[in-house]
Amino acid sequence: MLAPPTAAANLAEDSDEALMLSYAAGRATAFEMLYARHKGGVYRYLLRHCGNAGTADELFQDVWMNAIRARERYTPTAKFTTWLYTLAHHRLIDYWRTSGKVKFASIDAEDEMSGDGGVRATIEALPAARSEEPEARLNARQLAEQLRSALATLPAVQRDAFLLQHEGGLSLNEIAQLTGVGMETVKSRLRYAVAKLRGELAMLRPSPREDFR
Amino acid sequence: MSNLPDEPEHDPQLATAWREHSTDMPPAHLDAAILAAARRAVGSAPQDAARRSREATRPQRWWMPLAAAATIGAVALGILQTGPLDEPASAPTVSDMPAAPAPAREQIARENTVRDNSAELERKEPRSVAPEHGVASVAAPRATERQDVPAAAPRAAEPAARSSAAPARQAAKVSAATITDGIAPPPPAMPAAPMAPISPPPAMPAAPMATISPLPTLPAAPQPFPADKKRDAKDPVTSKLSADTAPARSIAERDDLRTRSNEVARPGAPATAAGAVTVAKSALRQEATSAKAIDIDASITRIRKLHDEGKLAEAAKELVALRAIVPDADQRLPPELRPWAATVRP
């Protein structure tokens, strides 16, 4: 970090909300600390949703630019991560809407449907993960790619809840607040997502290629 | 979140596996772009802490080049102000005449004396038959020309006078103008015409006037400083002028006139310089008119000659006539004649 060591140490101990307020007051190093903390989670959240690195880069930059522009309006009424992932979630919804591939309304409607037909429709609408090559399944990253593939097969709302929980570290209440649904809805989504991914992992370990197909 | 097994929405093994294998990060160029945008948004740029500390502890030396520039400017201004002060002091101007020192006025009076002698010689000698109006017509254009000629014109007839002081030069120029104009009118009719030329422009050197003068018997014109005996001794022209004018006026008369001029031109006189010069000229003119018939030196010479020839009666008459004009005529006689002069009764 370019800032003096003492200042950097103080920033490392500050909370996300304090760092954001400090950045809003004009301290650029506070934003650098915030960015270092959350850039990976936000990027992976966007990448797992859109499945395209170029699109993820664009969305990622837009999210952080929106955060920079909204620094003066930021009020620590909630966790910073909630606020940040809300920006990412909204940007992702805008992207899907403009691209016309997926409509979150239909996906939300699918949530109540909870049938396999709806899941398949969502998987077909999602872009393929860039690391989804058959050769990669046999190497050391086989498990990770299988997880990404399995995540890609999840409905968008379930995937969104799962990513917000594991990448953003949000609680059920925060996810519910962010997505605008009830707590029980969030739990249901997460239950479906975890069950699906656990099944994929169980099938992958004894015979990954055969079981996956 | 909780790790309780009865929570179907959370699987610790799945979370660990996801955390281990999900390590994708944004590209570096994206990080740089976002951080730069963040810095620009708050108007701050990354700075080196060491450089900032150096700047914070750096002594305030901004005034050093400013002080150096001010010093150089002050020195330059001083040089510029002291340099030109010498030249105007030597620049001849007519306006400086009222402040002319007493020696300059004395020289003006001497010049008037020489002019009177010249006028007397002109009347006496028949060869000075040059037309007066012609002289005037020549002198006037020359004076006009001299107005155009700057004061730097060399004075060929008087090289030693170049080292004279500035006041002497100014007085010489004024006196030269006076002499030039004084030649034009006939001596008997010299009222105010010769007085006026005191105000001509300063650049009127006397030497060119001497070279064009149609009166070769008027050597007084080019003599601006007859009182300077040392210069007269060095300058052949001035010496010749002094020799020519010596017979025309006695030493006593000269001293008397000089004394009167000094009295008139005293610094404490109430009149202005021009007025003082005018008064002095008038007094000198009256004195010269009353004594111009007497040539003291010539009389002494004749007395000595008559005495040596044994014509004591004629010598006595001459001495009596001389005594009538010069009270101390006996003292002016040669020492060998004084015993005889003591025997002569009026």
Image: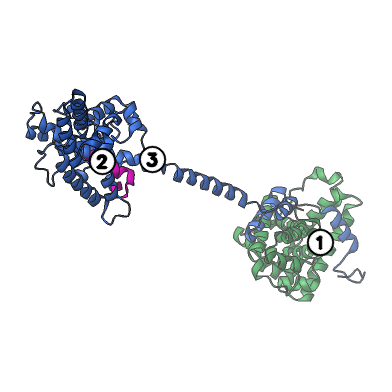
Chain colours: A green, B blue
Left or right: A173 with respect to B8? left
Q: What is the three-letter code of the residue carrying label 2?
A: Asp
Q: What is the three-letter code of the residue carrying label 1?
A: Ala
Tell me the residue at 59%/50% (across/down). B67
Q: Identify the residue under disc 1.
A: A12
Instruction: Give the residues drawn in magenta, as a range.
Output: B96-112
Q: Please tell me which residue lies in front, A18 or A211.
A: A18
- In which quadrant of the rendered view does residue B198 lie? top left
What secondary structure is marked by label 2? loop
What secondary structure is marked by label 3? helix
Q: CA distance from mark 1 to mark 2?
A: 124 Å
The chain to which mark 2 is attached is B
Please count the marks in the image: 3
Q: Identify the residue under disc 3.
A: B87
Tag on residue B328? 2
Looking at this view, name the residue that lies furthest to the front.
B343
> Mark 2 Cα within 10 Å, few/some/many (few <14, many 20+)?
few
> Mark 3 Cα within 10 Å, few/some/many (few <14, many 20+)?
few
**Image location of residue B286, percent across then percent down:** 16, 46
Q: Please tell me which residue lies in front, B146 or B5.
A: B146
